[in-house]
Image: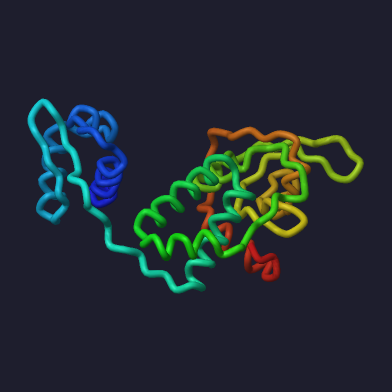
């Protein structure tokens, strides 16, 4: 983790807690030394963050510290909330939890009036119409880590058949969720409906090309796929 990201997470931990947090706890949390924790806290103080610390007690954030307010226009606030609500309704457990946390962080940096307007915009997202038998989080991880997936896939009226695929893109459409992937069985790009994947296995095998290069080829071959 880059130091800038760690400093933001340290600040978030201090804001969430009402009691002192020890250097030992923070060191174990981030996998760093206690000396590094002290250096990071010194940096936060130099940046104007009112952190108080005492040896053997820990660090605490003085009351009354707020991050600068986020100034969204009404349309920007609607766009952000609609996007997060879509993820909460249609995403897998891990990314839905991340969306919930992101929303809390955004609201934490807003004024009370803006927060009320944002949450009361009346925009909603419904659940998917098709049943999901596999975990989208595993597909996302395979895409991110460039790993192959072994899937049990069935077509209309047929028993499921095993295939090894290289996941390229995941699409959320009104009627169906779709995986675009290179299929080793067909030696070509194929689309797989998520509701027809009966099971999937994350393989500890990388596919031979970067996902970005595969995605570029896929989009050239399928310019109207919107993935």
Depicted 27 relative to depicted 141: above or below: above
Q: Is 217 left, or right, of 21 in this rendering?
A: right
Q: Is residue 57 visible?
A: yes
Residue positioned most to the left: 55
Residue 34 place in picture, x, y as percent: 15, 31
Q: Nearer the viewer, residue 38 or 181?
A: 38
User: Where is residue 205 shown, x and y percent of the image?
Assistant: 54, 36
Residue 72, image quadrant: bottom left
Q: Nearer the viewer, residue 17 or 180?
A: 17
Residue under the image location 59 percent in, 34 percent down: 202
Q: Residue at x 57, y 40 (%)?
A: 93
Q: Quadrant of residue 30?
A: top left
Q: Give above or below for 11 relative to 72.
A: above
Q: Quadrant of the C terminus?
A: bottom right
**Image coords of residue 123 (percent x, y):** 61, 62
Q: Quadrant of the N terminus?
A: top left
Closer to the camera, 202 or 51? 51
For the point 41% across and 64% down, which residue is it? 113
Give the colour scheme shown: rainbow
Q: Is residue 170 left or right of residue 41?
A: right
Q: Residue at x 53, y 51 (%)?
A: 209
Number of marks in the rendered image: 0
| Left or right of 4, for residue 70 | right
Residue 206 at what x, y percent from top left?
A: 53, 41
- Asked if one can make out residue 1 in the rendered structure from this viewpoint, the answer is no
Foreground of the two, 30 or 154: 30
Q: Quadrant of residue 121?
A: bottom right
């Amino acid at each position: 983790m880059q130091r800038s990201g760690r400093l933001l997470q340290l600040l978030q931990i201090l804001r969430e807690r009402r009691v002192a947090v020890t250097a030992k706890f923070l060191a174990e949390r981030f996998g760093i030394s206690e000396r590094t924790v002290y250096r990071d806290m010194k940096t936060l103080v130099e940046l104007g963050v009112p952190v108080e610390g005492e040896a053997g007690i820990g660090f605490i954030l003085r009351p009354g510290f707020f991050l600068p307010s986020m100034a969204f226009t009404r349309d920007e606030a609607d766009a952000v909330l609609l996007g997060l609500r879509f993820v909460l309704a249609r995403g897998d457990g891990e990314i839905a939890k991340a969306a919930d946390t992101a929303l809390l962080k955004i609201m934490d940096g807003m004024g009370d009036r803006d927060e009320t307007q944002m949450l009361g915009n009346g925009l909603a997202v419904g659940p998917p119409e098709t049943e999901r038998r596999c975990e989208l989080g595993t597909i996302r991880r395979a895409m991110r880590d460039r790993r192959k997936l072994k899937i049990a896939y069935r077509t209309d009226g047929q028993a499921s058949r095993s295939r090894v695929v290289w996941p390229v893109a995941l699409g959320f459409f009104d009627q169906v969720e779709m995986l675009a992937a290179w299929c080793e069985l067909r030696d070509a790009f194929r689309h797989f409906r998520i509701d027809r994947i009966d099971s999937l296995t994350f393989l500890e095998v990388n596919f031979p090309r970067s996902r970005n290069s595969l995605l570029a080829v896929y989009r050239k071959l399928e310019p109207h796929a919107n993935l």
